[in-house]
Image (tube, helix red, strand yellow):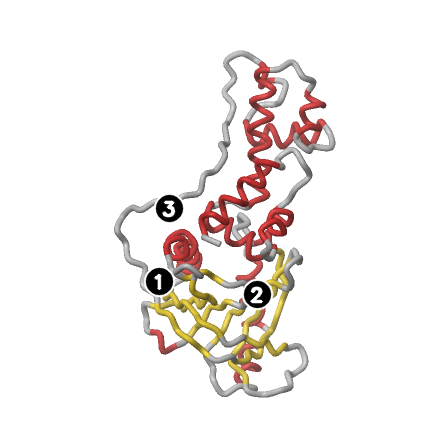
Amino acid sequence: MDFIQNLQRAIDYMEEHILEPITYEDVAKHLYISNYHFHRTFSLVTGITANEYIRNRRLSMAGQELSISCEKVINIASKYRYHSPESFTKAFTRFHGVTPSAARHAGIKLKSFNRLLVKIKLEGGTVMDYRIEKRKGFKVLAKVMQFRNESILEEGNTEIQDFWKECWNDGVFGELKENTTKHDTYGVCASISKESTHFDYGIGMEFNGDNAPNGYNIWEVKPTLWAVFKCIGKGGDCIEETWNKIFSEFLPGSEYIMTDDTDFELYSEGFGVDCFCEIWIPVKKKINA
């Protein structure tokens, strides 16, 4: 399905069920994609998570209803999926800057969070460099941890960065080099299952063996077609910037779609001083491309 149409379907579904107990997991199920893939795609394109979108829309609608009706606050709280007046008041005040009771006073300004409409916006005439590469399957010897899907774009979240630091401090990179012959470093990432609320992230090096040392996993990467992007910069911020461009610029207008398989960051001393790393995403051509 077209990238933009798929996102718009997600928004339409959330709007149709906004008063029901839905989460991003329900939306992913409706679209027949993994929780992880949907959460990351929606977050990187829109700048907010699907759960934040649902919450903000409910609070915006609740504010409008409070300002024009005489319905009890407790009833409006229940309508917009809050289980107590206290939790509703806390969320409402954080969003609008005033309490639900104060929202009924004449002249009070409330925040509006409108329904999203996804479309391609062409501006700037910038060029995003990438290459398409077909690669055989390979194995990565990796130290693997699970992370919550919601940690993607979560404000202040440094769990993956902390994992890299932990691996460095614990001598993981030295152990990896002892067990491998190619020493480029991979940050591999994939959903655990379609329904899982977590994803696997591994730090490792390419591996030709069959048995992993204790504490390590063998991560098998399938043979596939890849779109490869260079992250230009001297720090990790360029990774997030490149991911944002992949989802907001490359995928919407490309003849390729991203598949729900392993993607990875590749770090190599051979990239030169300007390239921090490369991002490899698994792709296939659109049916009608």
Q: Which residue is mark 2?
A: 190
Other-residue count near label 3 (Cα within 10 Å), few / some / many at <14 / 14–19 / ≥20: few
270 w.r.t. 60: above or below: below
Nearest to N terminus: mark 2 or mark 1: 2
Query: Disc 2 vs disc 3: Cβ atoms closer than 8 Å?
Result: no
Q: How far is the residue under mark 1 from the one under mark 3? A: 26 Å
Name the front one of labels 2 and 1.
Answer: 2
Q: Is 175 placed above or below 43 here?
A: below
Give the image quarter of residue 236: bottom left
Q: Earlier in the sequence, mark 1 or mark 3?
A: 3
Left or right position of 166 against 109: right
Residue bearing the label numbered 3 = 120
- Badge 2 element: strand
Residue under the point 40% across and 43% down:
119
Task: Please state which of residues 278 and 256 is positioned toward the viewer in this rendering.
Answer: 256
- Cα separation, mark 2 vs mark 1, equals 25 Å
Q: Label 1 sits on what residue type?
A: Gly
Q: Work out which residue is located at the far top of the displayed protein and give it.
A: 106
Q: Residue 242 in the image: state x and y as whole percent.
A: 40, 58
Could you say which quadrant of the image residue 280 lies in? bottom left
Q: Nearer the viewer, mark 1 or mark 3?
A: 3
